[in-house]
Image: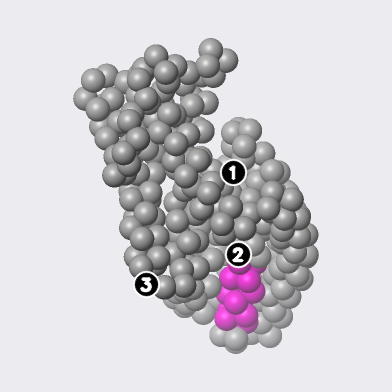
Amino acid sequence: MRSEPLLATDPPAPVKDVGELYAIASTQTQIAIQRYGKLAAQGDKTFEPVRCVFEVLSQREQDRAESIKDLCIAAIGRVPGPADLRWTPIDLVPSEELSDIGNSLLSTPYGAWALAVRHRERAFIFWTYVAALAEAKALRAAAENLAREALRDGNLLRRERRLAWRAERKRTAVEGSSAATELSMAALLESLLLKDIVWWSQDLPGPERKHLLSLIGTGSVDPVPEAEEAQSPRSETLEEIKHRALRRAEQLSSIYLDEADNAVDQPRLELAQQLAAHSIARLADLRAIAAAHR
């Protein structure tokens, strides 16, 4: 995860009353519902295990929204509304963080649960800050209650995160992903990606086909497969080929970055960094080409 502080900015002003407090909480929850819900609706089959996590998270936020309404009605006799806000509530579920998971073909349930934990930790810090600045006793108590709720919720999410981590470790152990295996896999993936790119390129106009094929250039002496040799199986669609190519390109970037992290000497580090830089640039180009032909 990222190394910057959980709460990048402080609230611009103290919360003045309970109506404003619940309006802030309601707005933040609605944003979370919208953003988690968008990922929960993502239809890609390979995203299914992660999508299920966001279905759960979206439902939890909907339940939280109802709870906030009930608390506000009990406190001031009405539901919170935009008119209660004096400043734009701080975003506790940044879209940039979610896009990292939504755009990655290597996302896992563990990553999704870990991000949800981070969001609730951010909520705890935010409401603790609000409580510390509150002057009225009732306002401070309400903020502390929301902070405690964020802490409890975070603990529940950590349990889910641990379970997902154990399941991921078990799967990885079964697959036998040692460092040597990863590097051996990289050579195979490079070869398979080359064929995918050739298949993909056959559906593109001349200039774009030339650009796509240029991404194969890695200094390898292996020849580019001829069109007849690289014919796509009849059962595969172009979208399936593109999706597979993107996944393989992302796997390669991850392998090379891991190798750089684990390098034991300078030559290996420099080679791994060079491979990673090339692979990341290639992945960005492939994503751009895929997006341009949806």
Write down the quadrant of residue 177 in the picture: bottom right
Q: Residue under circle 1?
A: 39
- Toward which corner of the image does residue 200 lie, by quadrant? top left
Q: Looking at the rendering, which quadrant does residue 70 occupy?
A: bottom right
- The foreground one among 232 and 28 is 232
Please give left or right for residue 64 compared with residue 46 in the image: right
Rendered image: mark on residue 266: 3
Residue 28 visible here: no
SS at mark 2 in the image: helix
**Residue appearing at x 39%, y 30% in the figure:** 197
Q: Is residue 27 magenta-colored?
A: no
Q: Residue 217, image x and y in percent?
A: 29, 39
Across and down, in percent, residue 241 comes to 49, 26
Check the image and report above or below for 217 versus 74.
Answer: above
Give the residue pinned by disc 2: 119
Q: Residues within 10 Å of mark 3 (few under 14, many from 20)?
A: few
Is residue 121 rendered magenta in the image? yes
Name above or below for residue 236 compared with residue 274: above
- Tell me what residue is drawn at x 49 percent, y 41 percent: 189
Q: Which amino acid, by three-letter code, is at mark 2?
A: His
User: Which badge, 2 or 3, is on the more N-terminal residue?
Assistant: 2
What separation in Å lies between label 2 and label 3 (alpha carbons)? 38 Å
